[in-house]
Image (cartoon, helix red, strand yellow):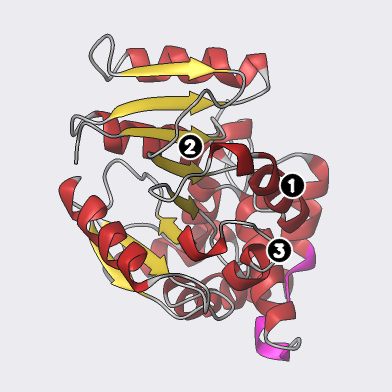
Amino acid sequence: MRDKRVGILGAGTMGKGIARAFAQKGYRVMLCDPHETARQKAFHELSATLPEGSFSIHSALPEVKDEIIIEAVPEDFAIKQAVLQEIAPHISAQTIVATNTSALSVTGLAKDLPYRERFLGWHFFNPAYRLPLVEVIPTPFTMAAVVEESQEILRSIEKVPIIAPDLPGFIVNRVARPYYVEALRLVEEGNVSPEVVDRLMEGLGFRMGPFRLMDFIGIDVNHAVTEAVWRGLWMPPRFRPSWLQAQKVAAGHTGKKAGQGFYSYQ
């Protein structure tokens, strides 16, 4: 199985993490991104952690028929849909295609794809090379054999695959929304600071408080997931997105990757 090549679309935080997860377990990895800056940054970071020759970086997806393709572009339905349509010529009867999405409808992405029976969701968690859990999200079109093979592949890189329903937020992000949303509401009310909330939650045993965790994940990513879950569940008040979080995104203060979020990383 490890003689298969893995094509990963998107060299952002998740794409790089997934590339590292596969390459360090012996898979041949091709990381693809149209943006030169993203490719250069990915090459620099992966070269520091992976042996030479274990990965290659491309501006477009090379010929990878009969292989594994993972889409890890930004959490935007239209962008993902366009990218997944573009790769249709690369799909054969043996290819598995997975979308790494935190909350978007996998069935919605699949319904117009010519290879939808070979398509499903793989939701990795950041950092993807370290955290073992991966949510596997089949659609009504996904063949049972593809679901089984997906789990075998993920176990071969020492992941723990869990079958999750294709519902807004799947399992983990559905459960996690109150952790972020309620923390944001407390701070919006002006009676407590992000630092105090984090200190209290970490004092209870959480490895990261909600604000430190949002900075680590990316405030823009976290906000997009909250919006997707909120809209997907018909806008329940308990999941209402935060104006404070939206303000941070508008200012470009998206967390650790930007040098500024709820905390400063200058």
Asked which quadrant contains residue 30, the reply is top left
Q: Amino acid at mark 3?
A: Asp
Q: Which of the numbered marks, if any, corresponds to residue 112?
A: 3
Quote the CA–CA distance across marks 3 and 1. 11 Å
Above or below, comparing residue 241 to residue 209 in the picture: below
- Image: magenta residue range: 236-243
Q: Amino acid at mark 2?
A: Gly
Q: Amino acid at mark 1?
A: Ala
Comparing labels 3 and 1, the label whose residue is closer to the camera: 3
Which one is nearer the viewer's eye here, 103 or 202?
103
Magenta run includes residue 240: yes
Quote the CA–CA distance across marks 1 and 2. 17 Å
Label 1 vs 2, first from the N-terminus: 2
Magenta run includes residue 187: no
Quote the CA–CA distance across marks 2 and 3. 24 Å
The x, y position of residue 217, in whole percent, is 51, 49
What residue lies at 24% left-to-right and 51% top-to-bottom? 153
Comparing labels 2 and 3, the label whose residue is closer to the camera: 3
Above or below, comparing residue 29 to residue 113 in the picture: above
- Residue lying furthest front in this view? 93
Q: Circle 1 is placed at which residue position?
A: 82
